[in-house]
Image: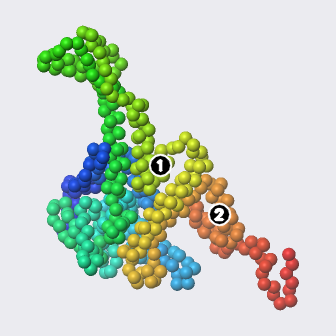
Amino acid sequence: MSFIDKLLGWRKKSNSTLDLFKEIFGREPSNSGKTVTVKTALEVSTVMACLRVLANGVAQVPLKIMLESPDGKQRLPAKDHPLYDVLACSPNEWQTSFEFRETIALHVGLCGNFFAFKNVVAGKVKELIPFEPGQVVVIREDNNSLWYKVTASNGNTQTFPAETIWHIRGASWSTWLGLESVVLAREAIGLAIATEEQHARMHKNGVRNSGTYSVEGTLNETQYKGLRDWITQEAAGVENSGKAMILDRGAKWLNTSMTGVDSQHLETRKFQIEEVCRHLGVNPIMVFMESKNSTYASAEQMFLAHVVHTLSPWYQRLEQSIDKNLLSAQDRKKGYYSCFVEEGLLRGDSKSTAEFLTKLTTNGIMTRNEARAKLDYNPLNGLDEPLTPLNMQIGAEPQGDENVTN
């Protein structure tokens, strides 16, 4: 068994006691009275929807290692580089590239940090072994060096130097540890949990209001218990919804609670969707929170804004982290760099795409074969040279005494 197998233990065990849903202990309850942990946060539909949007955006576009020519004129996929296959296809034995990057977004988006062990062979990263955020404790020395104490599923711990761990940080105040969204958004998530539970209890009780059943005279303990049991059996619950309650002995029903309308219950739940989206940096329309004022044109611009303002910063964060932590200084000097190919997300309808590519090719910005490559078409002979617009040819330098006419 390899060193990594001994440390992690999860390759041979499917019942890991440490998983993504490991609760974060020591959290103070939110003002709503709900304790917000990783587990309870993921059970909130808006939180999970936001994380899914981020994860899909990071995972669905190609991630490639590129090589820039010394003159800077060519940039080609570096398929011969060992890291190319690791990032684009198989980062470890059990995950695809999509699944691996999906995990990165989930961990960073909710916990602010992603950790992976770099299995380096002959100076090249051959494998990336992800850790769950709850397994890792980051230790900062007085000289600013970082160490990572990892706890395996069997309880064993080992401390790794910084150069062996790929640490992706989210927004950071300390500069060496990312801020946890599950903590920062505790109040918004806690209120979302509380309102959802309250709504569920209302439907459990048949959407009936709580109140007081008032009768004349004094009830003894037996009568009180019998009356309470009768109300619970005959008047409470969904199964009794719509049934008439028969009152005797001058009994009266006194309402003591507000209705869902009075408490603006639905309005509160809708507002909490927006609050959670603000914390996680996702446009509400991306989690199907549509505005009545949005049109097709405005929705299209919102989707574009999602790529520009939400996903592009994620791409930059990951690209720079890959270049710094997974590529060596020699690799960077030779021109290797990582690149998310997000053009597919920016592609419009077929008509807009055709017009866009036509303008690029007719103006000589792109060759016709490069345009075909954008559409995943095979190249054709004779289409590798850029076109020269006629208005650009007019200004060509005259040869000898030849005059140029318009």
Location of residue 87 in the rendering, given as x and y in whole percent from the top left corner: 39, 68
Q: Given this view, does label 1 or label 2 mark the residue nearer the observer?
A: 1
Q: Which mark is residue 357?
A: 2
Q: Could one spot residue 81 in this view of the protein?
A: yes
Left or right: 107 with respect to 160?
Answer: right
The front one of 87 and 303 is 303
**From the viewer's perspective, is residue 341 above or below residue 250?**
below
Pick the residue in front: 201 or 322. 201
Spatial CA span between label 1 and label 2: 32 Å
The x and y percentages for residue 214 are 25, 17
Q: Which residue is mark 1?
A: 284
Q: Tell me if mark 1 has few (under 14), some (14-19) or many (20+) residues whose alpha carbon lies within 10 angstroms of its own.
A: many
For residue 148, side relative to residue 104 (left or right): left
Quadrant position of the C terminus in the picture: bottom right
Judged left or right of residue 119, residue 359 is right
Q: Looking at the figure, which quarter contains the N terminus?
A: bottom left
Q: Which residue is at 61% across, 53% downward?
A: 349
Secondary structure of the residue carrying numbered label 2? helix
Which residue is painted at 57% across and 58% down in the image?
Answer: 347
Q: Nearer the viewer, residue 130 or 174?
A: 174
Which amino acid, mark 1?
Pro
Amino acid carrying label 2: it is Leu
Q: Position of residue 25 (x, y in %)?
A: 22, 54
Q: Residue at x 44, y 83 (%)?
A: 333
- Seen from the viewer's position, the closer of residues 321 and 276 is 276
